[in-house]
Image (tube, rainbow, N blue to C red):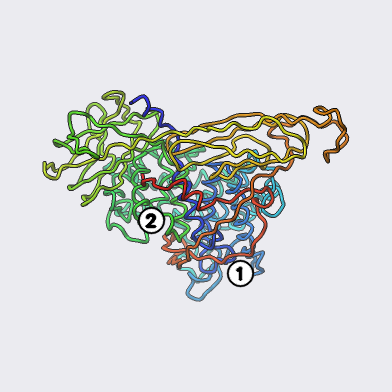
Amino acid sequence: MHVALALAAMLAVSPRWAFEDAYDNVEGGDWYMGIDNETAQLAWGESYVLWSLMAMARSTEHPMYVDRMARHIDALLAQRDDARGVADYRGVSGACWRNTSYQDGGEPYCYAVHSGMLAYPIADLAAFVATWRHRDALAYDGETFAAKAGVYAEAAIATAAYHDDEWNDAGYYVFRGDATFLAFAGKDQPLNQSNAMGLALLALHDLTGEAAYLERAMALAKRMRAMMTASPSGGLVWNYWGGPYKAPGEDISHAALNVEFAVQAARRGVVFTEADLDKIATTFLEHVYIDDSTFSDFIGGGGVNDPGYRAQIGRWLALTPVRGAIYAAVHDAYQRDYPAAGVGSGSLLLGWANLAAFEPRVCPHFFYPHDWQDQGESMQATAYGANVLTIPPDLGVTCRVPLHVLASRRVVAAQWDGEDMHRVAEWQPGPDFAARSVAYEPRWPLVYFEGGVLFEFQDDFNEAEAVRVEHPVVHEPPTITSQPPTTGEPGVPLEYVPAGAGDPPFWWSLREGPVGLAVDPGSGVLTFTPMVAGDYLFELALENDLGEAVQAFTVHVSSPSASTGEGTDTGSSGDEPTPTTGDETEESDTMSAPTSTGDGSAGSTDAPDPGETADTGGCGCRGGDAPGLASLLGLGSLLRRRRATAQGGRRAR
């Protein structure tokens, strides 16, 4: 039994489908397209939509996410001041998105933080496309992604340059001194506002290799790190404005920008280290996370569950590779309190994108036999400190253990390292079984019993109200049961309808194939028309929450003359065709299917200052319909009905 459990090793796909539900909610995926930034809806709404699409593009490499980003970025650039023909308070119509709502007199001002929030994903996408295998495929408007990335690179460079005069060589950005209508004219900007520009600078260095961008980003990182103070719990704390720490520190929404900057800097080896990220993760687990229902509003503690701050925990998920317990805490809160079908704000959409992008492997549990009494569908603890175990597929990588728990009393879940128990989750009592998670933390890789690491449930034990845990559900990893085609002819459409088995939901993807070719993640149907003879290499993958199956195959396309001896015209040139590989094939077609749209309505966005990231709703104006990647390549949209069928009867985990 435990050998089978150890095979449960791959990324889960349920959050990907949840993201699709969330994305469709606002204007069928258009979100803030067609809206300007006068009231900061682009800076604190559309930016998060772009960040979320970038997270999905990186984690799946599916062309539809890059195509969606292209549509959104094109609409965003159409709202830039130099495109709209409007100007800031100086009369300059620059490469920025002005705001008028934060100034009492309505003076137009372009905030560096707004530019950073928007230029960061633009530059990040341009850098991504540079090495992406589909870079020469066509976007929604018929331009190649590579060509569009060139335009986006120039746009991000221009936006960063607009704020050059706000840079202080001491290592931070300042508000313009002649903007006397601002309360802080000439003063250094809050940490999160400078660091939003720092994110754009890091991406621009990735894109261009220019040292000046890295030098500024490094200066910002050094300043940020110097402003952090060690807390008694081993975390790092800081203030909104920097300076000597004063409790409770920065709110968790603005702080999430600084966390993102620290994570991105550390990934590039810029000032911040893995040890620093570990301390920031400790800040979340010791100061912000109180229990499964309670989160502090500030990084140093203080008030809890402010609706403007609480949902922003999803923006801390980049710390998952450091501490899996953060993912488990956010996962359970989002599943329960922020269901994807009700998402109406950009920051919540980003939370779901992060849940998809950082989803750890799912590991089933089993019971330590001496601690439990069988109650049929569940086991009941017989004493304080009852134990469950899981077999991580890799002791060096975190995994999430999904449980259904009846906790009549407050319960702390702790992982055993051989000497001490370490809190990884804490649950409020409730009257019913509820979906809860614990995370295996690889920093304590003790194998205790039958190949499993051990977790203890600590509560104020009472036999009549002892904790109960349902038996693990038997899940099947995916398998591809169909046989792919192996031959074809030039100019003749070829279709492959794959079949799979296992535990839904499923996610199909084409990991190798002709440039621009993709499959509908819900069906996996592959249709393309080879234009010349040759061998076409494909790699089709099927994933579920437990694992993946990969089917690699080659389609040999022979010319009619070679197979029949006849000189039939196939529509190709008279020259001898060059055999093609998956990276050389010309334009291809995939399946076509109806388009699904969301039915969510938009709410309002309230941003009381230019650094405010807490949004409780989103609004967007639907742009005109345009042909997209779906029509150019025939890529089928994600069908709700198919997805619902695939997920039918599936218990939330």
Residue at image mark 2:
338
Instruction: Tell me how many marks there are.
Output: 2
Name the spot of residue 133 as percent of width and height, x first. 65, 38
Instruction: Name the foreground residue: 564 vs 142.
Output: 564
Instruction: Name the foreground residue: 517 vs 412.
Output: 517
Name the spot of residue 188 as percent of width and height, x first. 47, 57
Residue appearing at x 68%, y 39% in the figure:
515
> What is the three-letter code of the residue carrying label 1?
Arg
Q: Is residue 71 above or below residue 521?
A: below
Q: Residues within 10 Å of mark 2 (few under 14, many from 20)?
A: some
Residue 573 falls in which quadrant of the image?
top right
Secondary element at tag 2 = loop
Q: Is residue 65 above or below residue 392?
A: below
- Figure quadrant of the C terminus: top left
- Residue that lies at the very extreme toward the left in this rendered image: 463
Secondary element at tag 1 = loop
Q: Which marked residue is nearer to the observer: mark 1 or mark 2?
A: 2
Residue at image mark 1:
90
Judge left or right: residue 66 versus residue 410.
right
